[in-house]
């Protein structure tokens, strides 16, 4: 059974990760969710846990674990998919910052990494975000470009999380 780590950061689109996890589980993948602590304000740990069938990794220093979570997680993973990826988390990945479970996992894995950004169009077009994405691409990290359209905030442009079926297909392609 192939193992997929699904990273979830705190975009308003975080709830869509739930449907994505269901698609992976339905297709027989073993799914391990890694959520930023901010993401857990937008989608519940319990929901992610029930849908994936596995404990959710979020806090780095959990009292009930003796293992080193990020190291343990990377073992045998076929893919790290980050969906949705915030500007903040993308910035951490591009700069080697490892101050939470998701960014530490990003640095720890040796499997392919796929990132599906989701953010306001102005944020997505900002030179800081553009540079961070270009840097990650130069390291071989793959991206699923966001869709264009009306953002939740009312702005128009590119930044909406790509359709989850598209993300699902790209993920399956990346590991087959
Ligand atoms: C309701 C809400 C929705 C948000 N949506 C987004 C988003 O779609 N994309 C984004 O980059 N940041 C978004 N943010 C801002 C991030 O949550 C913020 O930058 C946070 O520090 C990112 O933390 P994380 O990367 O650790 O999850 C949103 C914030 C709130 C309160």
Image (cartoon, rainbow, N blue to C red):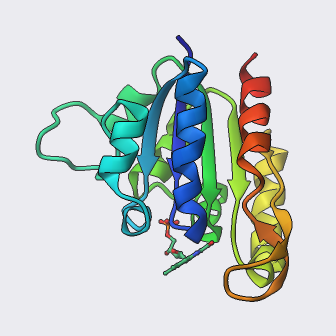
Q: Could you say which quadrant of the image residue 24 lies in?
A: top right
Residue at the extreme left of the image, as rendered: 63
Could you tell whether 121 is left or right of 7 in the image?
A: right
Q: Residue at x 33, y 52 (%)?
A: 45
Q: Decide: is 143 above or below 31.
A: below
Q: Position of residue 128 (x, y in %)?
A: 76, 75
* Picture layout, residue 78 above or below residue 165: above
User: Outermost residue, top direction?
Assistant: 1
Question: Residue reaching furthest bottom?
Answer: 154
Identify the residue at image location x=30%, y=49%. 46
Q: Quadrant of residue 142?
A: top right
Q: Nearer the viewer, residue 56 or 78?
A: 56
Looking at the rendered structure, the number of numbered marks drawn on it comes to 0
x and y, in percent, of residue 147 in the image? 84, 62
* Quadrant where the image shows the C terminus: top right
Q: Quadrant for residue 118, please give it.
A: bottom right
Q: Position of residue 57 (x, y in %)?
A: 35, 43
In the image, what residue occupies the spot 62% across and 40% down?
A: 81
Residue 120 placement, left or right of 28:
right
Give how far across and how far down residue 77 sits, in percent: 53, 23
- Ligand 1 falls in which quarter? bottom right
Examine the rendering and report whether any part of residue 122 can be seen: yes
Can the viewer see residue 107?
no
């Amino acid at each position: 059974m192939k193992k997929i780590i699904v990273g979830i950061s705190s975009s308003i689109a975080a709830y869509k990760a739930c449907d994505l996890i269901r698609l992976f589980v339905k297709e027989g993948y073993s799914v391990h969710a890694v959520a930023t602590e901010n993401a857990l304000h937008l989608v519940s740990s319990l929901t992610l846990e029930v849908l994936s069938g596995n404990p959710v990794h979020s806090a780095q220093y959990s009292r009930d674990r003796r293992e080193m979570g990020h190291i343990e997680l990377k073992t045998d993973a076929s893919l790290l998919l980050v969906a949705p990826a915030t500007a903040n988390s993308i910035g951490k990945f591009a700069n080697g910052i490892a101050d939470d479970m998701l960014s530490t996992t990003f640095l720890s894995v040796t499997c392919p990494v796929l990132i599906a950004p989701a953010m306001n169009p102005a944020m997505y077009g900002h030179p800081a975000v553009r540079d961070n994405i270009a840097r990650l691409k130069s390291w071989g990290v793959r991206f699923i470009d966001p869709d264009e359209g009306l953002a939740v905030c009312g702005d128009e442009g590119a930044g909406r999380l790509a359709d989850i079926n598209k993300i699902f297909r790209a993920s399956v392609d990346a590991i087959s």
